[in-house]
Amino acid sequence: MHMYVFNADGTMQQANPDAGDAHGSDSDGKGIWVVNGTHVRGKWVEIMADRATHGFTGRGEYAFEISVSGDRLSGNGTMNLFDANGRPAGVIPTAFTGERVTLHR
């Protein structure tokens, strides 16, 4: 599970649970977003490290497109992975759904 915060100035943050990967640790993602017609397009980047050595292992760059309907969203994206030397290390296509955090009274 991930949590995204979209700021009004077009910046964003992404957080994921630290225990989500037993071998590697990902930083929080930082990125940008824009409205594109009826969709939101964006990209964020996170830094990755080895849990045992704490050494830098690379980065992930996630590009996405979201459709919003009320408090629900759905979309797809692609995570492009790069090794510590900046060489491509894999591509992970994804699809996702989510909902807006709201305060129910």
Image (spheres, grey):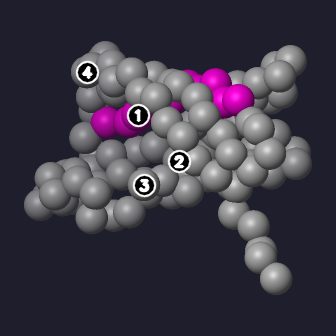
Q: Earlier in the sequence, mark 1 or mark 2?
A: 2
Q: How far apart, in angstroms, are the residues tagged by discs 4 and 3? A: 23 Å
- Report crowding for label 3: few under 14, some 14 to 19, many 20 or more residues within 10 A (C-alpha): few
Tell me the magenta residue range.
58-67
Q: Position of residue 70 (x, y in %)?
A: 80, 45
Q: How far apart, in angstroms, are the residues tagged by discs 4 and 1? A: 9 Å
Of the 4 image quadrants, the one containing the C terminus is bottom right
Residue depicted at x 64% and y 52% = 99
Q: Which residue is mark 1?
A: 60
Q: Hey, which quadrant is residue 81 in on the image?
A: top left
Residue depicted at x 41% and y 27% = 94
Q: Amino acid at mark 2?
A: Gly
In this view of the protein, which residue sits in the foreground, 21 or 28?
A: 21
Q: Are marks 1 and 2 in contact (CB under 8 Å)?
A: yes
Q: Tell me how many marks there are.
A: 4
Please determine whether, in this image, residue 36 is positioned above or below residue 70: above
Magenta: main secondary structure: strand
Q: How far apart, in angstroms, are the residues tagged by discs 2 and 4? A: 18 Å
Q: Which residue is mark 3?
A: 1
Residue depicted at x 83% and y 22% = 38
Q: Earlier in the sequence, mark 4 or mark 3?
A: 3
Q: Earlier in the sequence, mark 4 or mark 1?
A: 1
Asked whether, in this view, residue 9 is left or right of residue 75, the answer is: right
Q: Amino acid at mark 1?
A: Gly
- Report crowding for label 4: few under 14, some 14 to 19, many 20 or more residues within 10 A (C-alpha): few
Q: Which residue is mark 2?
A: 29
At mark 1, the secondary structure is strand
Q: Position of residue 51 (x, y in %)?
A: 18, 59
